[in-house]
Image: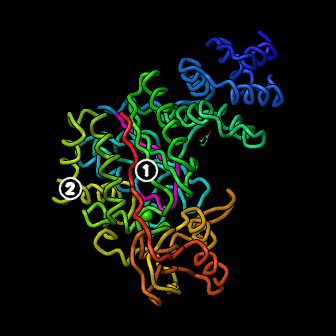
């Protein structure tokens, strides 16, 4: 087999065989196929697309390019949730104990990653003592006994994806549905879950800026998952404004605690119930989404969900008293309000720019080497569509630095006030 023939075949719009896709991924991972040939193929795929069969084959070839996590030691159906990423997205922190409170196993592997705020493991770092660097044996044991555990990213998962994604990034081939869908799904499948719920975000703070693209991506991923034997569902949700009110690590832990008690912000509460219902149905914990939602609401209100969070903290060395005493979480030195400069309605809160502001405060990483300050971030006081009076606080900046004039300026520029404003829907579609 020759790589040049595979490139030409795809360039001319033909379907690649399973063997040809395997040859490419194995050769590229091993370094016997050079970057220039891989980028030519990526460009051919960009223009010619891939059939459902090719997409499934590409996904599985990437899964098999490295280690995979074996969760077979955990009893029951393991459901994982993946978000395509957003600003102030606190859902994982809530969903893991919430779904586990229904005795459904949640084996969460979570990365640190780059971005506006940290990953789930960074957020959990704000709880004194909490350890995500646990052994695989302890991880499996905890999920079996208490239904929930969080482990930091381990192992060399999907090296082919890492290499190909970096190449796509510099060759104008990131925005290809078959390539994005296989990239995301390969990582989820390698992480070992039996079923997958996808939260595909759309809007300024999201990877997919418009709803049509987000829906196309969601359908592609759901199809790949189901074609390779992992039951998969998805939703399309808004990320034009930040989710909930808190953006920042310890601040989001507090928001997650409130939400687990049924007292969270309306949008985060709704998103968690929507995604959680899909997880419960996929794990056979309910027959319908409506029944699943009812069960989840029940554990939020009878205290079982927050109790499960405490158990999760205790099991991994964290201090569970933060649940009842959130003042024990790290706190920033200064809390600075941002007063509105005019009266009207909040017309826009540009999610990604507000996220960058939080990152500049120290809540997230611009490069892998950056350290996170878990105490800092932003608490929004308004959602798009809310009324605001001159002088009223739009948000509170939690900071350990005093020189934040540039950050304030950035926030003013990205929170627009107008005479009229419509509320933004949170969930655009549910794909089952
Ligand atoms: N996120 C991924 O993990 N892969 C892509 O290809 C795009 C976004
Ligand atoms: Ca939030």
Q: Quadrant of the C terminus?
A: top left
For label 1, the residue is 237
In the rendered view, tell whether residue 151 sits above or below residue 156: below
Q: Position of residue 54 (x, y in %)?
A: 59, 19
Instruction: Please name the residue shown 23% across and 47% down the image.
Output: 293
User: How dense is the environment of label 2, judged by Cα within 10 Å: few (below 14), some, or many (20 and up)?
Assistant: many
Instruction: Please name the residue shown 35% across and 35% down the image.
Output: 78
Of 164 and 67, the residue lying toward us: 164
Q: Is residue 87 magenta?
A: yes
Instruction: Please name the residue shown 56% across and 68% down the image.
Output: 354
Instruction: Please name the residue shown 58% across and 62% down the image.
Output: 352
Say how the picture is coloured.
rainbow
For label 2, the residue is 304
Mark in front: 2 vs 1: 1
Alpha carbon distance from label 2 to label 1: 27 Å
Quadrant of res 301:
bottom left
Q: Position of residue 281 (x, y in %)?
A: 27, 36
């Amino acid at each position: 087999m020759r790589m040049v023939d595979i490139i030409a075949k795809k360039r001319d719009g033909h379907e690649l065989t399973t063997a040809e896709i395997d040859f490419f991924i194995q050769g590229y991972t091993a370094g016997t196929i050079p970057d220039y040939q891989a980028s030519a193929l990526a460009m051919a795929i960009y223009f010619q697309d891939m059939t459902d069969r090719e997409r499934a084959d590409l996904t599985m070839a990437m899964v098999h390019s490295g280690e995979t996590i074996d969760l077979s030691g955990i009893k029951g159906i393991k459901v994982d949730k993946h978000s395509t990423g957003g600003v102030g997205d606190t859902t994982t922190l809530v969903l893991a104990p919430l779904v586990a409170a229904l005795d459904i196993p949640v084996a969460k592997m979570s990365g640190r990653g780059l971005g506006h705020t940290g990953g789930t493991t960074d957020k959990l770092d704000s709880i004194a003592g909490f350890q995500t660097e646990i052994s695989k044996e302890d991880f499996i044991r905890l999920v079996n006994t208490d239904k929930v555990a969080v482990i930091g990213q381990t192992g060399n998962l999907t090296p082919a994806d890492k290499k190909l994604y970096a190449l796509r990034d510099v060759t104008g081939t990131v925005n290809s549905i078959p390539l994005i869908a296989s990239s995301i799904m390969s990582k989820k499948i390698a992480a070992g879950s039996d079923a997958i719920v996808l939260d595909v975000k759309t809007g300024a703070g999201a990877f997919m800026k418009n709803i049509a693209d987000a829906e196309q991506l969601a359908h592609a991923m759901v199809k790949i998952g189901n074609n390779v034997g992992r039951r998969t569902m998805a939703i399309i949700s808004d990320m034009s404004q930040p989710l909930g009110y808190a953006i920042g690590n310890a601040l989001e832990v507090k928001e997650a605690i409130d939400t687990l008690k049924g007292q969270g912000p309306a949008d985060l509460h709704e998103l968690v119930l929507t995604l959680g219902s899909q997880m419960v149905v996929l794990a056979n914990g309910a027959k319908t989404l409506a029944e699943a939602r009812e069960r989840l609401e029940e554990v939020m209100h009878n205290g079982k969900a927050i109790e499960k969070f405490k158990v999760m903290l205790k099991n991994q060395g964290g201090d569970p008293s933060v649940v009842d005493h959130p003042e024990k979480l790290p706190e920033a030195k200064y809390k600075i309000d941002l007063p509105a400069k005019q009266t009207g309605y909040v017309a826009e809160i540009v999610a990604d720019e507000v996220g960058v502001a939080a990152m500049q405060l120290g809540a997230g990483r611009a490069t892998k080497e950056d350290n996170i300050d878990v105490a800092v971030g932003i608490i929004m006081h308004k959602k798009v569509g809310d009324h605001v009076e001159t002088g009223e606080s739009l948000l509170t900046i939690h900071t350990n630095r005093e020189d934040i004039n540039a950050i304030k300026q950035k926030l003013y520029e990205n929170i627009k006030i107008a005479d009229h404003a419509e509320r933004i829907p949170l969930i655009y579609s549910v794909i089952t």
